[in-house]
Image (cartoon, grey):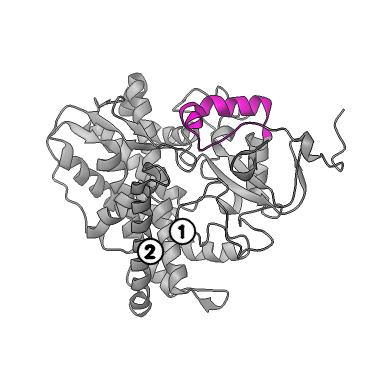
Amino acid sequence: MSADPSTPIPVTDRLVIDFDHYSPEYRDNWPAICDENLAKCPVAHSPHHGGFWVVSDYVSVTRVMRDDTAFASIHHAEDPDTERPDDGTPRWPVARVATEFDPPLHSRYRRLLNPYFAPTAADELEPFVRQTVDALLDRVCASGRIDFVRDLGNPVPMLAVMKLVGLPLEHWQRYAEPLHGLLAFPTGGAEHRRCVAAVEQLGVELRALVPARREQPGEGLLGALARATVEDRRLTDDEVAQVALLVLQGGVDPTTALLGNALAWLAEHPDQRQRLIDRPPLLEHATEEFLRAFTPVPALARTATADVRLAGQQLRAGDRVLMSFAAANRDPDVFPDPGEVKLDRAPNPHTSFGLGLHRCIGSNLARSWFRLMLGRVLERMPDYTVDRAAARRYESIGIVNGFVDLPATFTPSEPVGASLPG
C-alpha cells in the first residue's frame, strides 16, 4: 500500500546513499554505480558536499528537467544575489550569467542566442569545420602519431566556437589550453589556479572588446550581444563578456569528451569501427548512441522551490537536486540492454542534452562537429590504435566525462593540403 503523498517524510526517513560524483571511485566505476542507484535508490540523498538529492531514473530526471516551477535553475531561489557556496553540484568553473536563469529571463537570453545555434548555423559552419579538421590532421598524418584530445578534439571545437563568437582565430591556443585545463588539472592545484586566472583574464579581454563591437558589431555572436537588449535595457559589458565566455566554455570540452570516448571505444571494438567505415550513414545513429552511452556532461543541478514528492521521497524547498543524466541514459525501462553500445539504436531519447526549456542550445553544433571529426578520422586513420597505458582521464568526471590525453598511432599518410582557416 503506497503512502499518502500529502504526508511528509521526516528527514530521518530519507533514503541516504554514499554517492560522490567527484570521487575517483565514481570516475572509475560510474556505469556500475549508476546501475546500482537505478536498481536500489532511483531518488536518494547524499551527505556529500553539504547534502543533495541524487535523481537517477529516467522518469524522475525528465520531470525535474521539465518542471521549471518546482525545480529552479538558480542556486538560491529566495535570494538570487546570495553568493553560491561550493556545494559540489556541477557548474561551469568561471561564467555564471544565463546558466542559472529561469523563465522568463532565461527565455529572453535564449532568443538572443538561438539564431547562432540553429541547424542552419551548423550547416553554415560545416565547411569551416571540415577544413579545420583536415588542416589539423595534415599536421600529424605523416608522423603516424596523434593525441586525439590535444591535436584534434580540443582545437576543432575551440576554433569553431571562436568563429561563432567572432574572435580572432590566431589566438585560439590562448583560449584552448586554459579552458581544457580547468577540467584537466586537479581542482585547487597550482596548474588549475593558473588556468582559472588565465580564463578570468580572457573574460577581461572579452569585456574590453564590447564597446567597439557596439559601434561596429561585425560578424559573430559578440557583436550581436553587444547591441542586444534584455528587459528593455542594453546588456552591460560584463554580461556580454560572461555570456560569450560561457559559450566558449560550454562549446568545447563536452564535444572533446564525446570524441575521446567514442574513439577509445571504437579502438576496443574494431568490428564496430569497420561497420562505421563501411556504412558512413550509420554515423548519425551512432552519434546519438555515443551521447547516450558516454554522457559527456553526466549531471546538472536544480533547486527545489517548494516541498515536492519524487519517487517516494520527500524533497524540501531549498534542497539541491542532482539530475544524473548518465544514470537516466542507462535506465532499462527506456533503453533495452543499456550497458551495450548499439550503433543503430532507435529510438534513442537520451537525456545528454537535457530536456525542456533548458535543453542544451549547442546540441546542433556539437553533433555536427563530432560527426565531422569522427568521420574524417575513420577515413584518414582507419587503423588507429589508442595507447591506453598513456591515456589519462580527468581526475574528476563530475562536470565533464572526458580525457586529458588520448594518444594513438596509425599508418602514416600524405596530407590532403588543407590549411587552418582564418
* Name of the residue lying farthest toward the bottom: 215
Kindly report the secondary structure that dominates the magenta region of the rendered protein.
Answer: helix
Q: Position of residue 132 (x, y in %)?
A: 24, 49
Q: CA distance from mark 2 to mark 1?
A: 9 Å
Three-letter amino acid code at the position of disc 1: Ala
Q: Is residue 386 above or below residue 174?
A: above
Residue closer to the observer: 127 or 215: 215
Residue closer to the observer: 89 or 188: 188
Is 42 magenta? The answer is yes
Q: Is residue 305 left or right of residue 279?
A: right
Q: Any mark on residue 95, and which? A: 1
Is 300 magenta? The answer is no
Q: Position of residue 223 (x, y in %)?
A: 38, 71
Residue closer to the observer: 183 or 402: 183
| Visible residue check, residue 350 | no
Residue corresponding to mark 2: 203
Region of the chain picked out in magenta, as a range: 17-43
Check whether the beta carbons of the residues at disc 2 and disc 1 lie within 8 A of each other: yes
Mark 2 surroundings: few (<14), some (14-19) or many (≥20) residues within 10 A: many
Residue closer to the observer: 115 or 150: 150
What secondary structure is found at the residue carrying circle 1? loop
